[in-house]
Amino acid sequence: GDSVTQMEGPVTLSEEAFLTINCTYTATGYPSLFWYVQYPGEGLQLLLKATKADDKGSNKGFEATYRKETTSFHLEKGSVQVSDSAVYFCALSDEGAQKLVFGQGTRLTINP
Amino acid sequence: GAVVSQHPSWVICKSGTSVKIECRSLDFQATTMFWYRQFPKQSLMLMATSNEGSKATYEQGVEKDKFLINHASLTLSTLTVTSAHPEDSSFYICSAIYRRSGNTIYFGEGSWLTVV
């Protein structure tokens, strides 16, 4: 079945550092790919998404590019802030479906 | 923006008892909601799809008699863990589809269940 594998955390960085959280997937069809973020005490929020190969999703300085050849959707940010501290989930959904398959989540802590 | 709220956020119950978790869409109607659970350091796993006015659709391996889902109104779905055991201790989170917003999925805050 479909699956998502994320970089194992926790990840700790200093403010203004460059961030990469790796995500790879296995799917039979042509899924849509997502990054969700969960801040302490809150629900998951959609951070960005890409629906087809070579699409780049971006939001709040975060970017991820849908790479079909490497089945990857790595999350990047050029300069992280303390407020980016959260748990990040990579996810996919099969074409036409609304069920999400999640990675295990990566806890990110940014120190001032 | 659209909000989904879960209650309770934390619950501790005794082994053998039942516990109910509510998932509400606060400012939109949701004909479809989803229930997930997450074990420590593991992925969020879909348990079931909750459909308003009809029976829930359970994922393979999820016991429907143990995890009762009711979606009696367009803004409320409930998950009842019956005869809870310590192995049911987990993080449960729901989501709802906001169809008027391009089928955007909104998540609740999640509920921590501890069975002692």
Image (cartoon, coloured by chain):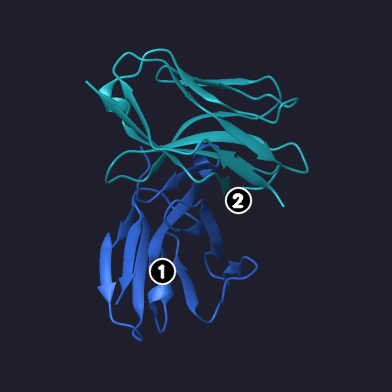
Chain colours: A cyan, B blue
Which residue is found at the position 33% from the left and 51% from the top? B109
Residue B101 - label: none
Element at badge 1?
Answer: strand
**Residue at the (74%, 36%) spot, across then down:** A30
User: Which disc, if any, is residue A99?
Assistant: 2
The secondary structure type at the circle numbered 2 is: loop
Q: Which residue is denoted by mark 1 in the rendering? A: B78
Q: Quadrant of residue A42?
A: top left
Q: How many marks?
A: 2
Q: Amino acid at mark 2?
A: Lys
Residue at the limit of the structure toward the left, as seen here? A112
In percent of width and height, residue B79 lies at 42, 70
Q: Position of residue B81 (x, y in %)?
A: 42, 76
Residue flagged by tag 1: what amino acid is it? Thr
Quick one: label 2, few (<14), some, or many (20+) residues within 10 Å? Answer: some
The answer to whether A59 appears left or right of A26 in the picture is left
User: Is label 1 or label 2 in front?
Assistant: 2
- In the rendering, at what x and y percent does residue A29 appear? 77, 41
Note whether B92 is above or below A72 in the view shown: below
